[in-house]
Image (cartoon, rainbow, N blue to C red):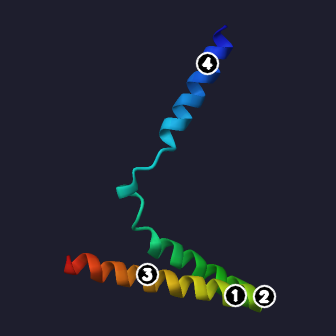
């Protein structure tokens, strides 16, 4: 009996801690851009040109999206 209660309590706690408030999730675009930039540099050093190019493009677009959203939020 206690095992069932304990496991259901853990599942409930995990489910409530994983919920994200939509207003608190944004703002990590620069962190993701840096991550993809580092991945691109590492891939280029290791000779994986395709992965490096793809990572570079993803980082570039994340920075562009960040700048556009920053300008929009500054104007509004």
- Expressed as whole percent of the image width and height from the top left, the position of residue 58 reads 58, 82
Residue at left offset 46%, top offset 73%:
29
Q: Residue 12 location in percent, x, y?
A: 54, 29
Name the mark on residue 19.
Answer: none
Q: Residue at x 64, y 22 (%)?
A: 7
User: Which residue, given by chain and number where applicable, does mark 1 sit on?
Assistant: 52
Q: Mark 3 packing: few (<14 Cα in 10 Å), some, or many (20+)?
A: some
Q: Earlier in the sequence, mark 1 or mark 3?
A: 1
Q: Residue 4: percent from the left, percent from the top?
A: 66, 15
Residue at the disc numbered 4: 6
Are the residues flagged by discs 4 and 1 in contact, CB closer than 8 Å?
no
Mark 1 falls on what kind of element? Answer: helix
Q: Which residue is mark 2?
A: 48
Q: Is residue 35 above or below residue 43?
A: above
Cα separation, mark 2 vs mark 4, equals: 48 Å
- Which is in the foreground here, disc 3 or disc 4? 3
Among numbered discs 3 and 2, the one appearing first in the sequence: 2
Please tell me which of labels 4 and 1 falls first in the chain: 4
**Reading the chain from its start, which is encountered first: label 3 or label 4?**
4
Determine whether 61 is above or below 9 in the image.
Answer: below
Q: Is residue 74 left or right of residue 20?
A: left
Q: Residue at x 20, y 81 (%)?
A: 75
For the residues labelled 1 and 2, say whether their Cβ atoms are less than 8 Å apart. Answer: yes
Whether the residues at callouts 2 and 4 have beta carbons within 8 Å, the answer is no
Which mark lies nearer to you, 3 or 2?
Answer: 3
Q: Nearer the viewer, residue 44 or 11?
A: 11
The image's mark for residue 65 is 3
Gap in Å between the C-alphas at discs 4 and 1? 46 Å
Label 4 neighbour load within 10 Å: few <14, some 14-19, many 20+: few
């Amino acid at each position: 009996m206690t095992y069932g209660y304990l496991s259901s309590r853990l599942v409930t706690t995990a489910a409530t801690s994983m919920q994200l408030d939509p207003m608190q999730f944004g703002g990590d675009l620069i962190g993701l851009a840096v991550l993809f930039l580092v991945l691109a540099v590492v891939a280029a050093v290791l000779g994986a040109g395709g992965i490096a190019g793809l990572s570079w493009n993803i980082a570039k677009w994340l920075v562009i999206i960040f700048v556009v959203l920053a300008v929009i939020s500054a104007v509004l």
